[in-house]
């Protein structure tokens, strides 16, 4: 019998991390290149704040969880030095992108730059107790809280009050960030935040009648019959559900874990492409045509996050439905996204038929985060609760 845990850990340590360690470090200007082609060559030198924060987090997490590898610490600190020097405006907001030298290219309109900066510096503080790292993580977190009700602020393109909507992504990310930086904050703050985001995710954005989670709802939680209001991202839902399961473990709330799994199963069933396999990127709650032209693409992060969710669900409940979905997802993901010819990182973007659409290994949205995090999470989870099979692929 083959062991999934070993397979995922070997892929993490022997293919994925060596690819980023070798190819992404900008030794001249600092920080990380993420626009890497199939072979690891840099094809564009722009740097993206949220991917800088994510890569700091990844290497700090590896050092914390898998052993004190001096190279991992050095790489995490390398990114942190660049971010400290170039990352924020005078109000403490993190820019969206920079040129290779660190000069800002795009204003700090995107609050997820802040989320992943806080997460990255919080993780770095765990392995190197420099007060500056903790202060940056805390200051950024409280800035996120201040911007929470109006994340884009003056950079929002929406006309005020015509169709106000709130988006699922921020409460979803806060489910995870709350646990990632709780070592730096007062427990009362964390407890209140956890209660708030669980309510938002599981009551406001979740629609009881359909069993689905919407990407956008009106401020009072009501349904908006519009492109944005009907939008469903199955991958977001499934990723959020493993965040919720982690919170369920922290709270010792078995009912919450059970409900999260039920929502994840519904999203998988709804989002699975019955003809070609894989999970659709965007869908419409009323099955109308969607506005996103990339709606039927199959993306790397959607599939690896679904694998994490099913691994955690199997570990926590022993559900055979989790096992079945994990194996189905595993076969699709490893056969379609993994670059079997060149090794290293995986492809990120497939067409509906499961063919490689873009041969890049990294870019504006894909960096050193989802795949290494997922491989670690799955290896660690299934080491505790082995899920074995006769055929891994």
Image: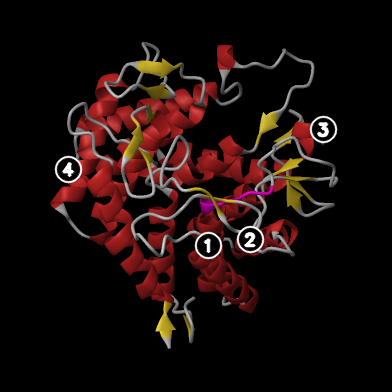
Q: Label for residue 224? A: 3
- In depth, the one of 126 and 352 nearer the eye is 352
Q: Is residue 85 left or right of residue 12?
A: left
Give how far apart the Cα atoms at labels 1 and 3 are: 36 Å
> Separation of disc 2 and disc 4 at Cα?
37 Å
Q: Earlier in the sequence, mark 3 or mark 2?
A: 3
Q: Is residue 383 magenta?
A: no
Asked if the residue under mark 2 is in contact with the one under mark 3, i.e. CB atoms within 8 Å, the reply is no
Foreground mark, 2 or 4?
2
What is the CA distance from the residue labelled 1 to the residue labelled 4? 33 Å
C-alpha distance separating marks 3 and 2: 28 Å
Q: Are marks 3 and 4 in contact (CB under 8 Å)?
A: no
Vertical relation: 204 (above or below) 147: below
Q: Earlier in the sequence, mark 2 or mark 4?
A: 4
Q: Which residue is mark 1?
A: 336
| Residue 384, image x, y percentages | 40, 74
Rendered location of residue 288, percent (x, y)? 85, 42
Pinpoint residue 259: horizontal percent, then vertical percent: 67, 60
- Quickly name the residue at label 4: 74
Question: Magenta span covers which residues?
Answer: 296-301
Dot 3 or dot 4, earlier in sequence: 4
Q: In the visual, does 353 lie left or right of 223?
A: left
What residue did someone put label 2 on? Answer: 278
Q: Nearer the viewer, residue 69 or 299?
A: 299
């Amino acid at each position: 019998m083959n062991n999934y845990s070993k397979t995922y850990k070997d892929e993490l340590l022997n293919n994925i991390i060596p690819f980023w360690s070798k190819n992404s470090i900008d030794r001249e200007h600092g920080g990380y290149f993420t626009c890497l082609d199939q072979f690891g060559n840099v094809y564009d030198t722009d740097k993206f704040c949220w991917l800088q924060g994510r890569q700091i987090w990844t290497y700090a997490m590896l050092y914390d969880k898998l052993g004190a590898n001096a190279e991992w610490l050095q790489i995490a600190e390398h990114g942190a030095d660049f971010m400290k020097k170039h990352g924020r405006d005078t109000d403490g907001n993190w820019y969206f992108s920079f040129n290779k030298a660190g000069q800002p290219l795009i204003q700090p309109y995107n609050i997820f730059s802040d989320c992943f900066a806080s997460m990255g510096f919080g993780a770095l503080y765990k392995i190197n107790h420099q007060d500056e790292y903790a202060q940056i993580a805390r200051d950024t977190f409280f800035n996120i809280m201040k911007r929470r009700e109006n994340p884009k602020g003056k950079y929002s393109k929406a006309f005020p009050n015509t169709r106000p909507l709130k988006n699922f992504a921020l409460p979803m990310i806060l489910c995870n960030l709350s646990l990632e930086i709780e070592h730096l904050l007062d427990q009362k703050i964390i407890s209140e935040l956890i209660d708030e985001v669980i309510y938002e995710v599981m009551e406001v954005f979740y629609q009881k009648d359909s069993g689905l989670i919407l990407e956008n709802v009106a401020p009072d939680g009501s349904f908006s019959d519009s492109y944005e209001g009907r939008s469903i991202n199955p991958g977001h839902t499934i990723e959020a559900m493993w965040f919720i399961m982690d919170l369920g473990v922290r709270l010792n709330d078995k009912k919450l874990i059970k409900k999260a799994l039920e929502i994840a199963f519904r999203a998988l069933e709804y989002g699975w492409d019955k003809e070609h396999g894989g999970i659709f990127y965007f869908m419409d709650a009323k099955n109308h045509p969607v506005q996103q032209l990339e709606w039927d693409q199959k993306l790397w992060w959607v599939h690896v996050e679904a694998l994490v969710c099913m691994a955690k669900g199997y570990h926590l409940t022993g559900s055979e439905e989790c096992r079945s979905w994990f194996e189905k997802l595993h076969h699709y993901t490893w056969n379609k996204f993994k670059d079997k010819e060149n090794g290293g990182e995986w492809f990120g973007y497939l067409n509906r038929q499961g063919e490689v659409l873009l041969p890049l290994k990294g870019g504006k949205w894909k960096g050193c985060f989802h795949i290494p995090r997922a491989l670690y999470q799955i290896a660690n989870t299934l080491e505790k609760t082995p899920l074995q099979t006769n055929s891994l692929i």
